[in-house]
Image: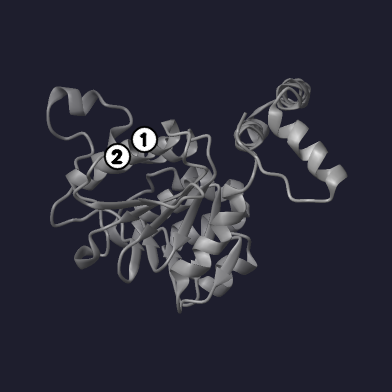
Amino acid sequence: MTDYRHLDVRTTESGVRTITLNRPERLNAVNPSLALELPAALREAHADDEVRVIVLTGAGRAFCAGLDLSEPAGLGAGSRADRLDDLAWVGRWVLAVAECEKPVIAALNGVAAGAGFGLALAADIRVIATGASLMAGYIRRGLSPDAGVSWWLPRLIGAGRATEIILTGRDVTADEAERIGLVSRQLPADDFGSHVATYAESFAAGPPIALALSKRLLRSALEQPLRDHLRDELTHIRTAFGTEDVQEALVAFREKRTPVFRGR
């Protein structure tokens, strides 16, 4: 596994890979090194069959405070190649999460702002520590959104709420985030990492192929005509029926035990 300068990467025996943004002195704000490292770590986790689920979190008291304005990662203002790059690092951050076919959980231990907010939104599931907060925040700096914030947020909580949160740039508390469905659940801040680990284990025990196929369907659902989506559902469930994991699940059901999925 690659050594990273600004990421701490650990994997449990059950296949939970935790990728921790590790610049706590800067609230895990994004500098050029971190901008490159996170997509690389996600690609590595995606390609590793031993990894069943990915947890993204932050070291210290923040998840990610967005762009580090003291050491900014560029957004296309440098070389000609930079200027012609239509995604830049911030787009690649989001795509690295969205295109990963393993469950990605954003464990929001503290504030998530700007690109950190976008990173959290791109995850499949968000859990938040009591007392943590989220904010788009761009308006506070005279900026419009990036990192997929204006794409994900309306899809997650509706256009009206998303518009108000983006145009005011205000904080969204953990309580409100849970109430409006922006996060799946709120977990105690005390020993937050242990609570997240227990939660992630339930995904690690799941059938890897079925999880990947389900993610494909969920990602395409809002963009696809119903007929096309029904066709893809049938294609994917036929694929799933051909796996050893389905046979194991049927045997386990008859034997009244928990199935052991191996991703085959």
Q: Which quarter of the figure is the C terminus placed in?
A: top right
x, y (%) of residue 134? 44, 64
Asked which quadrant contains residue 214, the reply is: top right
**Earlier residue among tags 1 and 2:** 2
Q: For residue 1, which numbered disc appears in the image? A: 2
249 displayed left or right of 103: right
Disc 1 residue crowd, few under 14, some 14–19, many 20+, Cα 10 Å: few
Q: Nearer the viewer, residue 205 or 172?
A: 205
Of residues 69 and 246, the one drawn nearer to the viewer in this rendering:
246
Q: CA distance from mark 1 to mark 2?
A: 8 Å
Amino acid type, callout 2 = Met
The quarter of the picture where the N terminus appears is: top left
Q: Regarding mark 1 in the picture, which secondary structure is present there?
A: helix
**What is the x, y in percent for residue 6?**
22, 52
Q: Is residue 24 left or right of residue 153?
A: left
Q: Residue at x 12, y 27 (%)?
A: 79
Q: Looking at the rendering, which quadrant does residue 262 occupy?
A: top right
Vertical arrangement, residue 184 with respect to residue 41, above or below: below
Instruction: State the residue position of label 1.
Output: 44
Q: Is residue 241 above or below residue 62?
A: above
- Label 2, secondary structure: give it: loop
* Residues tagged 1 and 2 counted as in contact (Cβ below 8 A): yes
Q: Residue at x 23, y 39 (%)?
A: 75
Picture coordinates of residue 125 (x, y %)?
56, 52
Quarter of image, res 96: top left
Residue 162 visible (yes or no): yes
Residue at 33% across, 31% down: 87
